[in-house]
C-alpha cells in the first residue's frame, strides 16, 4: 500500500514518475512494497516538532508521546519501525510474525475498495518468521512504543505453542506484545476467541510471560465480528487473568457497508472507512464490559473526527493503517492536530480526559 504523502518526497528524490495517482493505480501489494522500500531508504518525512503535552499519555504503563499508532500488518517483518516512529507515530506495531517463515496466500490477495475507502486483504500472515524480525529489532532504538504482534503458522499442529514461542522470543525486546487471534485469513485462528480455547491460550501465554526477564505488557487483539455472547465470554475469561489490555479490532468478514462495490466479493478481511462504525461500536461494548482495562481502538480511523470519536468511545490509544493508503501520511499530522483541538475545545488539558466520554452512545449505535 502506498502512502500518498510520500510522493512529494519521492519527487524530491528524483522519482518524479511515482506520483500519488500512479502509485494508487499500481497493484496494491506492489505499491506497498515500494512504500516500505522508500521508508527503508530514508525518504519518509520526519516529524518537525515534538508533540504537544495534550497528547502525552500512557498505555499499560508505557509512556506515549501521542496516542496514535501504526497498526499491525503494515510492517510485517520489522523493516521500518524506526522511520515510522520518526514520522510521528506514538506507537508502532510490527507483525504479525509467526515462528517459521511462511509465504501466505497466493496473489492477488490485497484489494482496494476505492469508492468506499476500504481495503480487503487475505494476506494470510505472509512473513519472514521470528528470527528475521528478531534480528532486525535487536539493539534497534525506536523512539515510540514498539509492539510485536505474534501469531501462529497456518500449518502448525499446536497454535497455542506458537504464541508461547512468540512470547519467549520477543518478551525482552518489545515494549508490548499483541496476541493476534482475530485474523480471518488463517483457518481456525478465530476459534481461539472461544471460551475454553481462550482460557488455555491466555494461561500459557501469561505463564510464558511470567518466566521472561521483563514483565512485558500483553494485549489481545479481537475481531469485530463477535456477538454479545462472544464479547461476554472474552470479558469473563480475561477478567480471571492479568492480561494488560485489548486491541479492538481486526478486520471484518462482513461486507454490508461495501455491498455492490468493486472488489467487495473478494474473500478476506475488510478494513478502512467501512469498518469504522462496527469496530467503534465493538470497542465501546468492550469498554462497558472491562471497566478501566486499557483498550486500543483500531478500525476505520480516517479523519481527526473519527480519531477523536474512537477515544470518546473508550480507546486509551488508537491505531490506523488503511486510511493512510488513501489519505497519505499527512493524515497523521492532521489527526494529531485535530486531537489537540478536541482537547482544548472540551476545556481539558490532556487527551486521556476524553477517553470513554461517549461510550454509551457508541455502544448502543446511537453515535455516528
Ligand atoms: C493489508 C493488511 C494487512 C494486515 N495484517 C495484519 C496482521 O498481520 N496482523 C494484525 O493483527 N492485523 C493486521 N491487519 C489489520 C490491521 O492491523 C487493523 O486491525 C485493521 O486494518 C483495521 O484498521 P484500519 O481500518 O485502520 O486499517 C492488516 C490490515 C491490512 C489492511
Image (tube, rainbow, N blue to C red):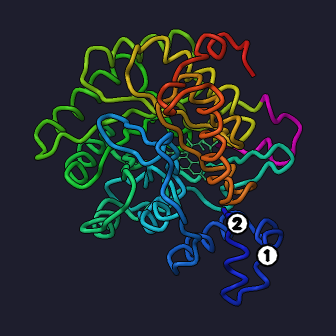
In the image: residue 182, left or right of residue 157? right
State the predominant SS element of the stretch in magenta.
loop
Which residue position is annotated with label 2? 5
Q: Quadrant of the N terminus?
A: bottom right
Residue 244, quarter of picture: top left
Q: Mark number for residue 167?
A: none
How far apart, in angstroms, are the residues tagged by discs 1 and 2? 10 Å
What is the crowding at mark 1: few (fewer than 14 residues within 10 Å), some, or many (at least 20)?
Answer: some
User: In this rendering, is residue 213 above or below 282?
Assistant: below
Residue 342, quarter of picture: top right
In the image: residue 203, left or right of residue 14? left
Residue 158 located within the stretch drawn in magenta: no
Q: Position of residue 206 (x, y in %)?
A: 21, 32
Q: Position of residue 330 (x, y in %)?
A: 68, 59
Which residue position is annotated with label 1? 19
Seen from the viewer's position, the closer of residues 186 and 306 is 306
What is the span of residues highlighted in magenta in the rendered image? 256-268
Q: Quadrant of the C terminus?
A: top right
Seen from the viewer's position, the closer of residues 28 and 272 is 272
Amino acid at each position: 500500500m502506498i502512502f500518498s504523502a510520500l510522493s512529494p518526497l519521492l519527487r524530491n528524490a528524483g522519482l518524479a514518475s511515482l506520483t500519488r495517482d500512479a502509485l494508487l493505480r499500481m497493484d496494491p501489494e506492489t505499491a506497498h512494497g515500494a512504500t516500505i522500500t522508500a521508508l527503508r531508504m530514508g525518504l519518509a518525512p520526519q516529524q518537525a516538532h515534538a508533540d504537544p503535552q495534550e497528547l502525552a499519555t500512557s498505555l499499560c504503563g508505557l509512556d506515549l508521546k501521542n496516542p496514535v499508532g501504526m497498526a499491525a500488518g503494515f510492517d510485517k517483518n520489522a523493516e521500518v519501525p524506526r522511520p515510522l516512529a520518526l514520522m510521528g507515530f506514538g506507537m508502532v506495531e510490527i507483525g504479525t510474525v509467526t515462528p517459521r517463515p511462511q509465504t501466505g496466500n497466493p496473489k492477488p490477495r490485497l484489494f482496494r475498495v476505492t469508492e468506499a475507502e476500504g481495503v480487503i486483504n487475505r494476506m494470510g500472515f505472509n512473513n519472514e518468521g521470528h528470527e528475521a524480525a528478531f534480528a532486525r529489532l535487536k539493539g534497534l532504538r525506536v523512539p515510540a512504543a514498539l509492539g510485536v504482534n505474534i501469531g501462529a503458522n497456518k500449518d502448525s499442529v499446536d497454535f497455542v505453542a506458537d504464541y508461547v514461542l512468540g512470547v519467549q522470543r520477543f518478551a525482552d525486546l518489545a515494549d508490548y506484545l499483541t496476541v493476534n487471534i482475530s485474523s480471518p485469513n488463517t483457518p481456525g485462528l478465530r476459534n481461539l476467541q472461544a471460551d475454553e480455547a481462550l482460557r488455555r491460550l491466555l494461561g500459557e501465554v501469561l505463564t510464558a510471560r511470567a518466566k521472561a526477564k521483563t514483565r512485558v505488557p500483553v494485549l489481545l487483539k479481537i475481531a469485530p465480528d463477535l456477538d454479545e455472547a462472544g464479547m461476554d465470554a472474552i470479558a469473563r475469561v480475561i477478567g480471571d487473568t492479568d492480561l494488560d489490555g485489548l486491541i479492538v479490532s481486526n478486520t471484518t468478514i462482513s461486507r454490508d457497508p461495501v455491498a455492490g462495490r468493486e472488489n467487495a466479493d473478494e474473500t478476506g478481511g475488510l478494513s478502512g472507512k467501512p469498518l469504522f462504525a462496527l469496530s467503534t461500536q465493538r470497542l465501546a461494548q468492550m469498554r462497558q464490559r472491562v471497566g478501566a482495562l486499557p483498550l486500543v481502538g483500531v478500525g476505520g480511523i480516517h479523519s481527526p473526527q473519527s480519531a477523536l470519536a474512537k477515544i470518546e468511545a473508550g480507546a486509551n490509544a488508537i491505531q490506523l493503517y488503511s486510511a493512510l493508503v488513501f489519505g497519505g501520511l499527512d493524515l497523521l499530522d492532521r489527526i494529531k492536530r485535530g486531537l489537540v483541538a478536541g482537547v482544548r475545545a472540551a476545556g481539558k488539558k490532556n487527551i486521556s480526559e476524553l477517553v470513554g466520554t461517549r461510550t454509551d452512545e457508541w455502544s448502543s449505535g446511537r453515535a455516528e
